[in-house]
Image: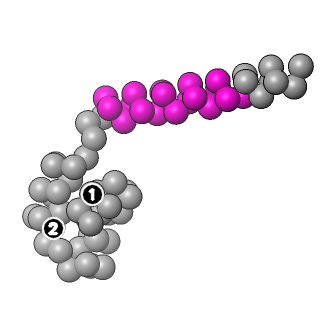
Amino acid sequence: MKQEAVNHGYSVIDVNSRLGISIKSLSNWIKKFSKPKKAREQEADLQAEVARLNRELKSHSRQ
């Protein structure tokens, strides 16, 4: 549940009001479970590369 609250991009206020979890607890969860910015950027780059390779593969398989 903690990771879901952090990784789904909900605001702290939204999670606080929906689940009744203190803002301090939520802040601690975010610090503990959030991926560092560099890791998120690398993940996005890898996803873009996979998408590009899939398009290239489809293009070659049609030939």
Q: Earlier in the sequence, mark 1 or mark 2?
A: 1
Amino acid at pointer 2: Ile
Residue 53, quarter of picture: top right
| Most distant residue in the right direction | 63
Q: Identify which residue is drawn at 87% across, 25% down.
A: 62
Q: Is residue 45 above or below residue 30?
A: above
The segment highlighted magenta reads: 38-55
> Is residue 48 rendered to the left or right of residue 36?
right
Looking at the rendered structure, the secondary structure element under dot 2 is helix
| Above/below status of 12 relative to 30 | below
Q: Which residue was labeled with disc 1?
A: 3
Position of 41 with respect to 15 (left or right) is: right
According to the picture, the residue beneath numbered tag 2 turns out to be 23
Residue shown at the point (25%, 78%) measured from the top left: 19
Q: Is residue 61 left or right of residue 42?
A: right
Local crowd size for mark 1, using a 10 Å CA cut-off: few (<14), some (14–19), many (≥20): few
